[in-house]
Amino acid sequence: MTAGSGPTLAVVGATGAVGTVLLQILSHRADIWGEIRLIASPRSAGRKLAVRGEQVEVLALSEDAFDGVDVALFDVPDEVSAHWAPVAAAKGAVVVDNSAAFRMDPEVPLVVPEVNPHTVRIRPRGIVANPNCTTLSMIVALGALHAEFGLRELVVSSYQAVSGAGRAGIETLREQLALVAGTELGTSPGDVRRAVGDRTGPFPEPVALNVVPWAGSLREDGWSSEEMKVRDESRKILGLPRLPVAVTCVRVPVVTTHSLTVHARFQGEVTVDGAREILATAPGVVLCDDPAAGEFPTPADAVGTDPTWVGRVRRALDDPTALELFVCGDNLRKGAALNTAQIAELIAAEWR
Ligand code: 2RA
């Protein structure tokens, strides 16, 4: 950092779906940064992107690109982070990484500023990890409830937007919607599949007019990598290494904003009024829960906003220690770019 200016920030993966949102967020939050340097793959080098109202040229990813960088935000594939994040850290930058490469490394904190901000300071590898968007879309609300009630078990189903799979996911849904619009498709077995053909993009099945019970890659015993991430990351963030967690991840035809149904069991009896009070006052959470008036969160309303939206708060019918919730969070904002920017701000505060 040079005297009289803020820390130098690098954004690695500046041209991707999350990188694009990150530049918007950096342009709208308090301007604490000195230089903001944009870095991407060599094929994007030379492009100019807007940040803080200025056009900034994108540099190709290289060791030299990290010269003088204080904080480097990475949103790139796992293997790119695995190689380049340690390079940036060795050059003196604190890395905030949004890939899965380091999330479960015991020497890398997995940080959600509203839940476990203190962990950001213990980073022996010079790397801080940002959780997966599905975990992040619920964990702020769960963290608030856990702090008061003591979480004992989680059962979760996700309804994940296609932008979780990046620009290719968005383009695939748009192309498929164009193919099925104005037709009678969705009325006989296989008709949507035949119309879509091999244009399934990053998804194993058509996502238009459909829901697909799969996200990520195959892990042991039929679990998906996405389901394992939600389980492992929730345990690490909440500091509950043996928390029972059951997850089913589902892709739905929504562009952006992940939703989840959550069954959360706590240490003792809970009340809906108590839960509502916690959720209504928790930083980063908006309680939107008046079913009699037709009010509950939906992706169509939550998209483009920062908070975790919570509705349908009910006590489990057969267990006075458990709550049922419906949660929505913009997977590109709090689910990725915003949380990354918030972590970077926590780190930047160490320079003051
Ligand atoms: C998805 N959570 O939605 C993943 C992206 N990190 O596909």
Image (spheres, rainbow, N blue to C red):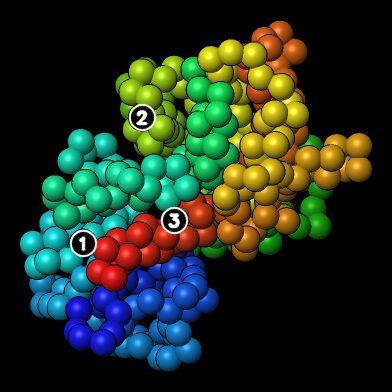
* Mark 2 crowdedness (10 Å alpha carbons): few <14, some 14-19, many ≥20: few
**Residue under label 2:** 239
Q: Residue furthest right?
A: 292
Which amino acid, by three-letter code, is at mark 3? Answer: Asn
* Vertical comparison of 271 with 311: above or below: above
Where is the C terminus found, in terms of image quarters?
bottom left
Q: Please tell me in which quadrant of the rendered image residue 60 appears.
A: bottom left
Can residue 40 be seen at all in this image of the molecule? Answer: no
Task: Determine the CA span between mark 2 and mark 1.
Answer: 23 Å
Residue at image location 46% in from the left, 65% down from the top: 17
**Residue under label 1:** 94
Q: Position of residue 243 (x, y in %)?
A: 41, 20
Q: Please tell me in which quadrant of the rendered image residue 73 appears.
A: bottom left
**Residue under label 3:** 339
Q: Position of residue 269 (x, y in %)?
A: 64, 14
Q: Which mark is residue 128?
A: none
* Vertical comparison of 197 with 235: above or below: below
